[in-house]
Image: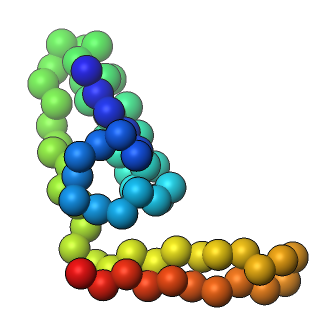
Amino acid sequence: MFAIGDVTAFPEEKLADRAIEHAELVADHIRRMYRGKSPKHKYTPPEEPSIMWVSLGPSNAITLHHYK
């Protein structure tokens, strides 16, 4: 069983870029298992601060920085 995105229990923000990283790793694990190999990598949440872009219309945005 695999989980990606918001349903994970990783101590990280639930952002799209994190879900994309999860999906790429899960896809690699599924490919490896299909070929009879063991998963090669383990996901480690990044330590750098998260940055979220919030749209304020067609030509403006703000960034939100989260520091732990």
Quarter of the view holding residue 34? top left
Regarding residue 41, the answer to whether it shows in the image is yes
Q: Residue at x 87, y 76 (%)?
A: 58
Left-right relation of 24 to 44 = right
Q: Position of residue 10 (x, y in %)?
A: 23, 52
Regarding residue 24, the answer to whether it shows in the image is no
Q: Position of residue 60 (x, y in %)?
A: 78, 86
> Taking 56 as reference, is 5 above or below it?
above
> Taking 10 as reference, is 50 above or below it?
below
Out of 50 and 35, give the one closest to the viewer: 50
Left-right relation of 7 to 62 = left
> Taking 65 as reference, is 40 above or below it?
above
Left-right relation of 38 to 35 = left
Q: Residue at x 22, y 74 (%)?
A: 47
> Taking 11 as reference, is 2 above or below it?
above
Which image quadrant: the N terminus? top left
Which image quadrant: the C terminus? bottom left
Q: Residue at x 29, y 27 (%)?
A: 2
Out of 30 and 18, give the one closest to the viewer: 18
Quarter of the view holding residue 8? top left
Q: Residue at x 84, y 77 (%)?
A: 57
